[in-house]
Image: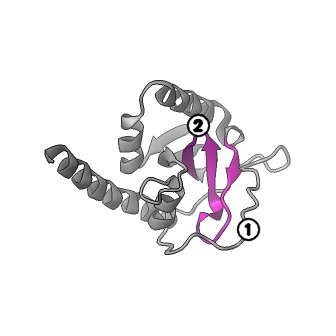
Amino acid sequence: MEVTATPLAHQQINRLRGPDKRAFDQFKQGLQSEGCRHLGYRMTGNIVERLCVKHLPRSLRVIVAFESPSAATVLLVGPHDDDPNIDVYTALYALAGLDDVPAAPRTKPPCCTAQAPLPPTVDQATVDRLVDGARQMRGVQSRRVGRRRRS
């Protein structure tokens, strides 16, 4: 499986250290060899229902979109946290253009199963919109980090 990452995910991956970096590297190897079977569950809610999530140690999450059964894009890598400024799901909803977290109960269906072995694919227009959003978010985060370093 071909695995790529958005510019924002690249930035997030590059910030990982120690056990988090090793966990992500193992995740990526698993994704490349096992595809959607390596992921935990699909999101629920409008727009995000075709995206899959993998829990890594502690609160680290990886959110993935499949463009085809053989191509995956890592959209975001980050903590699931009560602080909306660092929460990976808050960032995802912003990328997807959703103002609020979906109110419906989250059922967390599997990303794929033995009966349905292909991943839920995302149309190219949606992937492009998410990648463009990640580029814009990366620019905003880079400017914030730059300001913090100067302080």
Secondary structure of the residue carrying numbered label 1: loop
Residue identifier under label 1:
105
Which residue is farthest right? 115
Image point 76% across, 60% down: which residue? 107
Residue 130, image quadrant: bottom left
116 relative to 46 in the view: left or right: right
Q: Is residue 72 above or below residue 134?
A: above
Q: Residues within 10 Å of mark 2 (few under 14, many from 20)?
A: few
Q: Tell me what residue is drawn at x 45 percent, y 24 percent.
A: 18
Q: CA distance from mark 2 to mark 1?
A: 23 Å
Q: Position of residue 142 (x, y in %)?
A: 26, 51
Residue at left offset 58%, top offset 60%: 122
Residue located at (42% from left, 46% from top): 9
| Disc 2 secondary structure class | loop
Circle 2: residue type: Arg
Residue flagged by tag 1: what amino acid is it? Answer: Pro
Q: Which residue is mark 2?
A: 58
Q: Is residue 45 magenta?
A: yes
Badge 2 or badge 1: first in the primary sequence: 2
Q: Is residue 102 above or below residue 118?
A: below
Q: Indicate the quadrant where residue 60 lies.
A: top right
Residue 52 seen by the camera: yes
Question: What count of labels does the image hold?
Answer: 2
Magenta span covers which residues? 39-65
